[in-house]
Image (cartoon, grey):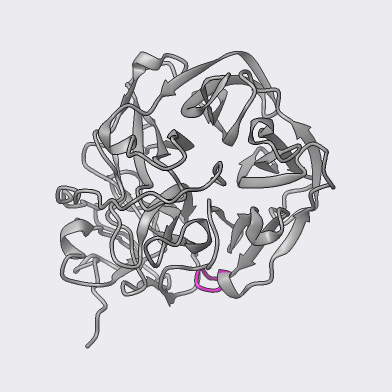
Amino acid sequence: MNRRVALIGSLPAGAVRFTGWRSVLAVAGAVTVAIGSTVVGVGAAQAPASGPPGEEFANPVLAPGADPSMAYYQGRFHLVQGDFYNDDNIVIRSSDTLGGLGKSEPKVVWEHPACPAPACTKIWAPELVHIGDRWWIYFAGQSDDSNESHRMYALRSTGDDPTGPYDYLGPLNLPGGWAIDGTYQQFENVGYYFWSCLHDPEDTRVQDICVVRMSDPMTPVGDRVSIATPTADWETVPNDADLKINEAPQPLIAPDGRLFATFSANASFDDTYRIGLLELARGGNPLDPKAWTKSGGPMLPGGPGAIAPGHNGFLTIDGHPWITYHARLEPGTGWEGRSIRVQPMYFGPDGRPRFGMAFGPDSPIVIEAPTPATSAAPVTPAAPATPAAPVTSAARPAPGKPG
């Protein structure tokens, strides 16, 4: 039986339609995406551009793996990884196709020093960011075996190649001490740094999402501001480590210019991990906690073969937004069971991001190769169905958190 389901309908060549995946995927197992036109919000698709080669792949694209950060640049996909999967070194995998990332040879772009030393162990969640004509990798690391020593560090490329080489720039002097899951974002010509901080610098049991203004990609200015703390039932599911967690902030600027930020809640080592969404009010100041609104529940429901989706990133493929994240093939498999996923997303008629539901291995994704076209019709996504209720399971005991 052919399980491919084209979500393009009768649109002209090069156009894309995302048609309410939550309802479609309840009865079908695939999505077809046409690449080669630029989608700007829910407006008109523009003239087609060259894109990646056509392919069919299924999630996960890399197993094991966690905390993905991915970029599509000059015709190639680049995935940065760290953690114990890579001996606490930072590696980049590159491929012409998404499905080829898991088969590509990891290139070590930075090796951790021997402990004790800054960033000598627990190298978590490296984040690949293109700033100006350089690539930056922000990552968390410990200076010894103590979780309290976790801080954010940075690498900067010597040229405009995401695979390096890179210079080690050292730690970021973020206010508040303990820090993980950091990334840089420019918004309205001002630089900001988002990271997971401690609600109380003296208590490692509660993690918030913090923001600080930056004078440059390495230098914070002023004090931090907490824009999210775990309070709702869906983001405070008990775990054996007695932690309350908001982490892995990922800023996202919508086509209409609004600023959003996804984050992950609950413990990454059990099956209650979830992705939430923060929205900055129109005209709001990112440093004003009152200007942010938190989603009332998870934004990316899991399912069979895609358990506990969390710690996401974003990438753009020829103008189309995609989301990458980790999830588990099997329940109860902890950190070792995580694997890397990627799938298309879109912005709804209200301008807010829509992620659909997490794709498992039974839902192949087909990328159609670009086709010539002289014009394209407007793209009008259908409204998505109501998200499914989160599925929870007993928490697994584990010390700390790798992202």
Q: Residue at x 28, y 72 (%)?
A: 30
In the rendered view, tell whether residue 231 sits above or below residue 331.
Answer: above
> What is the number of callouts on the image?
0
Residue 403 included in the magenta stretch of the image? no
Compare residues 2 and 60 and report the one nearer the observer: 60
In what quadrant of the picture does the N terminus appear? bottom left
Q: Position of residue 42 (x, y in %)?
A: 27, 45
Residue 38 vs residue 305, the one in the foreground = 305
Q: Is residue 80 above or below residue 149?
A: below
Image coordinates of residue 98 in percent, x first then y, are 51, 68
354 over 188 or under it: above or below: below
Q: Residue 394: percent from the left, percent from the top?
A: 33, 51
Left-right relation of 105 to 33 = right
> Left or right of 176: which side holds 7?
left
In the image, the segment drawn in magenta is: 97-101
Do we see residue 241 in this rendering?
yes
Residue 101 picture location, percent across and down: 57, 69
Can residue 283 be seen in the rendering of this structure? Answer: no
Task: Identify which residue is drawn at 47% across, 48% down.
Answer: 397
Q: Quadrant of the C terminus?
A: top right
Q: Residue at x 47, y 36 (%)?
A: 247
The residue lying toward the viewer, choosing from 104 and 381, is 104
6 displayed left or right of 383: right
Q: Report whether 80 appears left or right of 25.
A: right
In the picture as drawn, the residue positioned furthest to the bottom comes out as 1
Q: Among all residues in the image, which is located at the extreme top?
A: 222
Dominant secondary structure (helix, strand or loop) of the stretch shown in magenta: loop
